[in-house]
Image (cartoon, grey):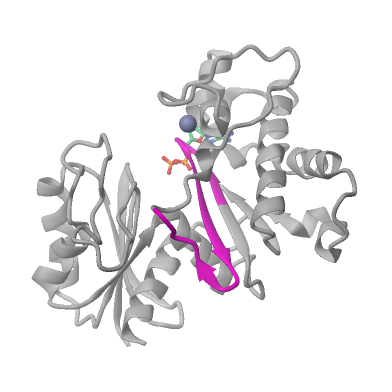
Amino acid sequence: MRLGALEAGGTKMVCAVGDEAGHIEKRAVFPTGTPDETVPEMLAFFEKEQIEAIGIASFGPVDLRVGSDTWGYITSTPKNGWANYDICGAFTGKLGVPAGFDTDVNGACLGELLYGNGRGCSSLVYITVGTGIGMGICAGGHLIHGMLHPEAGHMLLRRAPGDDFAGICPYHGDCLEGLCCGPAIGARYGIPAAEIPADDPAWRYTAYYMAQAAVNLILTVSPERIILGGGVMGQPRLLPMIRRETERLLNGYLKASQLQDMDSYIMEPGCGGDQGILGALELAAGVCK
Ligand code: ADP
Ligand code: ZN
């Protein structure tokens, strides 16, 4: 089967053609402008291909409610031109193929489940720590949707003693994203997160809050593994610190065998950056089943 895939991000759009086994044949990347600027470029890419379906994993919030009049739409984003935008319709209408649709992070979660470090799991959490914090959740083999879809990047946390940074989330101030996304770490220290030295105590706060998020997810979703991706995880000391802090906060409460080896329980992505587009490809395969 020839399938189309779109990983729709706030800064770039990754388009690919591939098959249901995760082979990517060709791809193109377009900077995210307004829909009027960017969608015609993407359509021109896909129109040349004989695809049977398209999978779209999109930045959100998005409407995933089956039967909703606005299923397949990006809903309330501040991004210019994309609010209440029928992103699925823009492709299904012009290409004449069905679309599979989910959040960007659920797409990445699916990609990791099938081809990355989530292989063999049926319950997996994928967290991206970048410009924002997003989480894709698969529980019992199903990507979680629900009333809207999980927005666990905004979970509320216990503050570290002595930490009086207000956080940068416009809605909550010091939610997880408000404290730990790249721009928040940058705002806290007055230099870009990527320039903070690896041995700076700055990373202790980040690890403490990220570990609280991991514990909250372990206690609610009970994933078999947690994958941490995104630009901030480019800080090499962070992943080991989050693992140790997660162990400390769990304090031996859960006896699951997976938790006995934290180094293989909380892991980096295993798809070399392709987890999102591979997940989108599988969303396309899903509508053909
Ligand atoms: P996006 O979330 O927009 O897709 P990324 O996942 O690439 O983008 O994340 C971008 C964020 O990651 C920026 O805020 C940047 O400061 C931060 N970042 C990039 N590299 C590093 C690094 N090596 N250490 C810490 N933070 C980093
Ligand atoms: Zn928030």
Report how many numbered discs are placed on residues in the image: 0
Quick check: can you spot residue 18? no
Which of the image's four quarters has the C terminus?
A: bottom left
Q: Position of residue 66 (x, y in %)?
A: 30, 67
Q: Is residue 36 left or right of residue 51?
A: left
Q: Quadrant of residue 98?
A: bottom left
Q: Is residue 32 left or right of residue 225?
A: left
- On whether residue 44 falls in the magenta region, the answer is no
Q: Position of residue 254 (x, y in %)?
A: 85, 55
Q: Position of residue 154 (x, y in %)?
A: 51, 36
| 95, above or below 166, in the image | below
Q: Is residue 180 left or right of residue 147?
A: right
Q: In this picture, which residue range is highlighted in magenta? A: 127-147
Which of the image's four quarters has the N terminus?
A: bottom left
The residue at 70%/38% (across/down) is 212
Q: Position of residue 182 (x, y in %)?
A: 51, 31
| 2, above or below 78, in the image | below
| 167, above or below 53, in the image | above
Quick check: can you spot residue 277? yes
The residue at 66%/53% (across/down) is 220
Q: Quadrant of residue 226?
A: bottom right
Front residue of 222 and 10: 222
| 162, above or below 139, in the image | above
The residue at 88%/59% (across/down) is 255
